[in-house]
Amino acid sequence: MNLPNKLTVLRVCLIPFFVLSLLVFGGTYQLFRNLAAAIFIVASLTDMLDGKIARRCNLVTNFGKFMDPLADKLLVCSALICLVELKQLPAWMVIIIVSREFIISGFRLVAAEQGIVIAASYWGKFKTTFQMIAVILLIINLPVLKTLTDVCTWIALILTVVSLCDYIAKNHRILTEGQM
């Protein structure tokens, strides 16, 4: 197993420790929330790092193509679900974000069956960046950062919808090809 794939596996392995740190004692101890934020940041950085290493060193594998986006979705969705549990995010907002991930994954699956690779768009990358910033701010949960946290959360939600519309607009033919 090459280094980028090991980083992807590490990201998945960090998820239970992240969830435990965030939810222990009902999320009431700042020390554990800070630990959860640190784990989330490390896991997020492995996402950026594994892709750069894989492309630069020509270490792209089928395992990485499959597991990297899955690991990202597991990490972010775990965080969002925990934040619903902690009553920091409304469930409807998380449903929109998670639904977008399922829809895009479905598009990619259908495209892969047709031999088409759907690359991440800039909208998707901006969405991911704002989601991760918002999640970190929500985990840290400092009252002085409430306005910034709210703004980043809403931007992440808006970019989630925009990136979904962008994917559908650019790739609708994938679902309609071969149908009469």
Image (cartoon, rainbow, N blue to C red):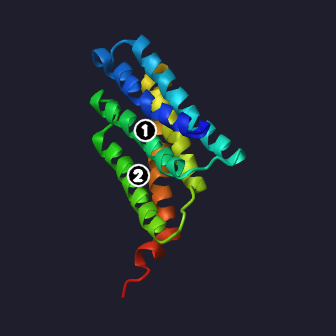
Q: Residue furthest bottom?
A: 180
| Residue drawn where x is 64% and y is 46% of the image | 59
> x, y percentage for residue 173?
47, 76
| Residue drawn where x is 34% and y is 31% of the image | 83
Residue sitting nearer the eye, 139 or 13: 13
Residue 136 position (above or below residue 5): above
> x, y percentage for residue 63?
50, 48
Apparent side of residue 8 relative to residue 29 in the rendered image (left or right): right
Q: Mark 2 — residue?
A: 101
Residue sitting nearer the eye, 116 or 25: 116
Q: What is the three-letter code of the residue carrying label 1?
A: Val
Lower position in the chain sequence, tag 1 or tag 2: 1
Contact flag, marks 1 and 2 (Cβ < 8 Å):
yes
| Location of the C terminus (image quadrant) | bottom left
Q: Mark 1 — residue?
A: 76
Q: Which mark is residue 135?
A: none
Residue 147 in view here: no
Residue sitting nearer the eye, 58 or 83: 58
| Location of the N terminus (image quadrant) | top right
| Residue drawn where x is 41% and y is 30% of the image | 15
Separation of residues labelled 1 and 2 (CA atoms) = 10 Å
Residue 54 in view here: yes
Q: What is the three-letter code of the residue carrying label 2?
A: Glu
> x, y percentage for residue 47?
56, 38
Crowd tier of the residue under label 2, counting other residues whose Cα lies within 10 Å: few below 14, some 14–19, many 20 or above: some
Residue 180 position (above or below residue 51): below
> x, y percentage for residue 33?
42, 18
Residue 33 position (above or below residue 41): above
